[in-house]
């Protein structure tokens, strides 16, 4: 930022300023934490959430009920602690006895203000009696499938509106964001407080115990009755390690020694990566001679990086799957509608009264019609890392405000590439191969015996017995 203004500053002053910003950030969190403790009463929680009883959503719009809109009651803010590993290898160019390569394992953590509060939910008893819980409620029902189809239709209308000429006039009728109960809250920016680094390895029990004790002492909300509850998030390994440590102290004398009130959860950071890895495992085969398959389509678009798979080249694989999925759907739509190309505009397809109707009516027609059709370096050390990690949020805010005031436009961090050409190229390839036409006896050499039902190998009875076994284990746990 300063270099763009041709302004320089000394190394020492820059470090001094980082120390000051880190202290300011810590002070901000302490103020927030104190305000939380001062207003934390059950009466306020109940009053704040009585206004949510009438919350409802229409099919397409997240309009609040009159009672919710008129309410001015706000509940005390709560927060969670989010942890993540910082694992990296420092390669020394000039090695010696005292200067060798290092494998570092640290833990970064931040406090995140909860955008959606859960104070209206009891911390004493579960929302459902586990002794009488019907396990079938945890399995997909017909209503689940119906809701999924509804959302797939919304996603598909976006593709048709963007790529098929006959539907380009439906731009005002397409749902660009599927609403849900907390759409307005989740559309706001997160408020977080960078809290620095623990120079500890979570895979070492003693290190993790120190980290958890520090979190308990510094961040656990407290009231006159003692410690309350705190959610601590991380990846699945972090969650499992923390639970094991907590269970190891379960026979201690006091609640504090037993680390009670700390509730560990896993964050779905890697869920999308796991999804793409499953996609790759099922659909990626050496199938260059089978037109329309994943490998053949990658070859057609010369996407050699994507062939490495989502684990080695996640962004490349994700971008290709987006193109491939859109192309497959468009090719299926062309076949279903009897079109020859995405540029076709048959006058009889859209009734005249629909063309002139309201966006809501046009959306309904569009969705029903679509529903009929069957995607850090060598100079780093603990002192500098601790200083930098605690000032990330403050520096980001300063840079954003300064750039805005000076009219400096920098990189957005996301490069929006137009995928239309690649998508339409794949559509042409799929049409040439008559991919969606029934051809008796057609078999892909790379996919012998491929089943349409991806869950065909699932042993439903074994799954049910395993779930019942886990439910019975939970039922005997003390509440």
Image (cartoon, helix red, strand yellow):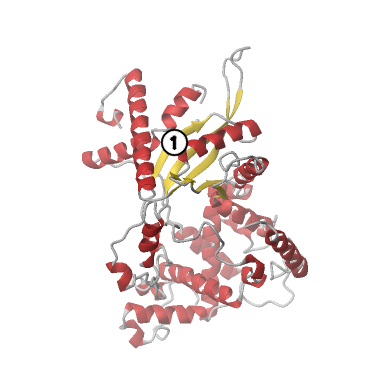
Residue 300, image quadrant: bottom right
Query: Which residue is pictured at 51% across the width and 64% down the height?
Result: 326
Foreground residue among 352 and 226: 226
Q: Is 177 on the left or on the right of 357, as rendered?
A: right
Could you tell me which quadrant the C terminus lies in? bottom right
Query: Which residue is pictured at 56% across the width and 57% down the height?
Result: 321
Say if residue 204 shows up in the picture: no
Foreground residue among 25 and 432: 25
Residue 176, image quadrant: bottom left
Residue 43 in percent (x, y) is at 38, 59
Q: Is 12 on the left or on the right of 374, as rendered?
A: left
Query: Which residue is pictured at 61% across the width and 21% down the height?
Result: 101
Residue 180 in percent (x, y) is at 43, 66
Residue 174, image quadrant: bottom left
Residue 477 in percent (x, y) is at 68, 57
Total labels drawn: 1
Residue at the extreme top of the image, as rendered? 97
Say if residue 270 shows up in the picture: yes
Q: Residues within 10 Å of mark 1 (few under 14, many from 20)?
A: many
Foreground residue among 419 and 141: 141
Examine the rendered structure and indicate whether residue 120 appears above or below residue 221.
below
Element carrying mark 1: strand
Q: Which residue is mark 1?
A: 195
Could you tell me which quadrant the N terminus lies in? top left
Query: Which residue is pictured at 48% across the width and 61% down the height?
Result: 121
Residue 449 in percent (x, y) is at 77, 67
Foreground residue among 326 and 425: 326
């Amino acid at each position: 930022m300063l270099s763009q203004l041709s302004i320089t500053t000394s190394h020492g002053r820059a470090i001094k300023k980082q120390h000051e910003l880190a202290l300011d950030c810590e002070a901000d969190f302490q103020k927030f934490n104190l305000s939380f403790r001062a207003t934390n009463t059950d009466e306020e929680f109940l009053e704040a959430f009585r206004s949510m009883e009438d919350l409802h959503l229409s099919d397409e719009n997240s309009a609040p009920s009159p009672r919710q809109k008129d309410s001015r009651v706000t509940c005390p803010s709560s927060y969670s602690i989010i942890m993540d590993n910082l694992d990296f290898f420092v390669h020394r160019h000039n090695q010696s006895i005292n200067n060798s390569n290092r494998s570092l394992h640290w833990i970064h953590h931040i406090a995140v203000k909860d955008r959606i509060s859960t104070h209206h939910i009891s911390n004493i008893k579960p929302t459902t009696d586990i002794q009488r819980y019907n396990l079938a409620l945890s399995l997909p029902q017909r209503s689940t499938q119906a809701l999924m189809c509804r959302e797939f239709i919304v996603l598909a209308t976006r593709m048709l509106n963007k790529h098929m000429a006959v539907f380009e006039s439906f731009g005002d009728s397409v749902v660009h964001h599927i609403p849900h109960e907390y759409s307005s809250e989740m559309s706001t920016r997160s408020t977080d407080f960078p809290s620095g680094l623990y120079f500890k390895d979570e895979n070492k029990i003693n290190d993790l115990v120190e980290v958890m004790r520090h979190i308990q002492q510094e961040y656990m909300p407290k009231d006159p009755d003692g410690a309350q509850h705190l959610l601590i998030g991380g990846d699945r390994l972090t969650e499992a390690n923390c639970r094991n440590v907590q269970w190891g102290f379960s026979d201690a004398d006091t609640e504090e020694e037993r680390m009670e009130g700390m509730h560990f959860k896993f964050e779905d950071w890697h869920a999308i990566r796991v999804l793409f890895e499953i996609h790759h495992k099922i659909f990626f085969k050496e199938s260059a001679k089978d037109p329309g398959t994943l490998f053949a389509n990658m070859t057609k678009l010369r996407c050699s990086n994507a062939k490495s798979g989502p684990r080695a080249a996640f962004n490349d694989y994700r971008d290709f799957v987006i193109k491939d999925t859109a192309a497959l759907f468009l090719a299926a739509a062309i076949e279903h509608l009897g079109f020859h190309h995405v540029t076709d505009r048959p006058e009889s397809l859209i009734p005249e009264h629909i063309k002139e109707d309201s966006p809501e009516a046009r959306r309904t027609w569009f969705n029903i019609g679509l529903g009929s059709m069957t995607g850090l370096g060598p100079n780093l050390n603990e002192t500098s890392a601790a200083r930098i990690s605690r000032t990330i949020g403050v520096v980001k805010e300063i840079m954003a405000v300064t750039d805005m005031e000076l009219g400096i436009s920098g990189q957005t961090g996301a490069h929006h590439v137009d995928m239309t050409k690649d998508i339409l190229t794949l559509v042409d390839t799929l049409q040439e191969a008559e991919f969606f036409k029934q051809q008796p006896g057609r078999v892909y050499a790379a996919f012998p015996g491929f089943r349409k039902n991806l869950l065909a190998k699932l042993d439903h009875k074994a799954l049910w017995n395993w779930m019942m076994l886990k439910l019975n284990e939970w039922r005997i746990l003390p509440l």
